[in-house]
Image (cartoon, rainbow, N blue to C red):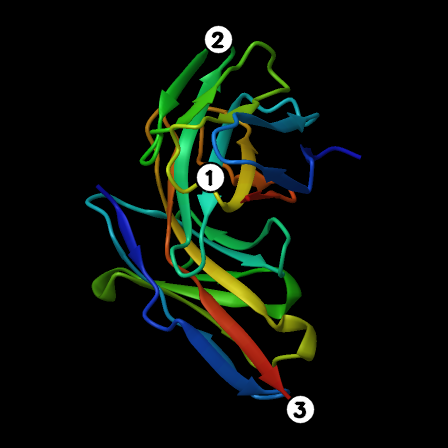
Amino acid sequence: AQSVTQPDIHITVSEGASLELRCNYSYGATPYLFWYVQSPGQGLQLLLKYFSGDTLVQGIKGFEAEFKRSQSSFNLRKPSVHWSDAAEYFCAVGAFNFGNEKLTFGTGTRLTIIP
Amino acid sequence: DGGITQSPKYLFRKEGQNVTLSCEQNLNHDAMYWYRQDPGQGLRLIYYSQIVNDFQKGDIAEGYSVSREKKESFPLTVTSAQKNPTAFYLCASIAKTGQAYNEQFFGPGTRLTVL
C-alpha cells in the first residue's frame, strides 16, 4: 500500500523568501505524484503533478517540484513567496490500476507568511 | 462553468440523526470520491464510485453510506452510527481516460457539526 509523509506540520517564511515543502512517499512501482493547495474552508486545488518524464515539474502560481526516485521524495519549491501563498499544502500519491484510481494524501503542511 | 458543487456549505446535526451531504458534478467524470478531513490528519477516503450503480468502501467507511444512481451525483449519508461525525467533508471526481492518471477535482466542501 502506498503512503505519504509530510514531515513539517507548520512552516513560517517571510514574504519574498524561498520556500521548500518536503514530501516523501512509499510505493512499490512508479508513483503518480501530486501537490494540492487548500485555502481555509475551501476545497483543494491542484498545483502540479508528476507522471513520468522530466523530473522537474512546473505548476501554477510559480511553484515547481522535483521527483527524486533515489530519495523517494517530491519536494515543492517556490523561489519567492507572496502573502497569498499562505495556505495548507498536501502531497498525494496515486496508484494507477484500471478501474481503481485512488489517492493517498499526506497530513499536510500549513504555510504562514510573515511581512 | 464546469465543476463540483457541494451543499450545504455548513450543516448542523443533532446526535442520533442521519444527514445527507450533496455532491453534484457537471464535468462528465466517471469516478467520484468522498473524503473526510480532520485537523492534522489530511484527507481520508470514505467511499468511492468508479461507475453508476457501483461503489466501494474506502479506509473509513463505517457509519457512512452512499448511492450512485446518476453519473453526476454521489450523495453521502452520515448515519447515527458514525461516532465522531464532526468534520469537513470533501467530494472529488476524476475523468477516467484509461491512458494515464488524471487529477482529481475537488468541490468546496461541507462542514458538518454535531450539536
Is A21 placed left or right of B1 in the picture? Answer: left
Mark 1 and mark 3 in contact? Answer it, CB < 8 Å: no
Say the numbered circle drawn on residue B53: 2
**Residue B65 spot, x, y in % from top left:** 44, 21
Q: How packed is label 1: few (under 14 Cα within 10 Å), some, or many (20 or more)?
A: many
Query: Which quadrant holds the C terminus of chain A?
Result: bottom right
Q: Label 3 neighbourhood size at 10 Å, few (<14), some (14-19), many (20+)?
A: few
Cα–Cα gap, marks 3 and 2: 52 Å
Q: Residues within 10 Å of mark 2 (few under 14, many from 20)?
A: few
Q: Which amino acid type corresponds to the residue marked 1 in the rendered image?
A: Tyr
The answer to whether residue A99 is visible is no
**Whether marks 1 and 3 lie on the same chain:** no
Side (left or right) of A43 relative to A96: right
Q: Identify the residue at image location x=55%, y=28%.
A: B95
Instruction: Tell me residue A86's x, y (percent).
Output: 61, 72
CA–CA distance in space, label 2 to label 1? 19 Å
At mark 1, the secondary structure is strand
Label at residue B101? none
Q: What element carries label 3?
A: loop
* Among the 4 quarters of the image, the one containing residue B4: top right
Q: Name the residue under label 3.
A: A115
Residue at 25% from the left image edge and 45% from the top image edge: A2
* Residue identifier under label 1: B35
For disc 1, the chain is B
- Residue drawn at (39%, 48%), measured in percent from left and top? A52
| Residue B113 coordinates in the image, percent (x, y) | 56, 45
Identified by mark 3, the residue type is Pro
Q: Residue type at mark 2?
A: Asn
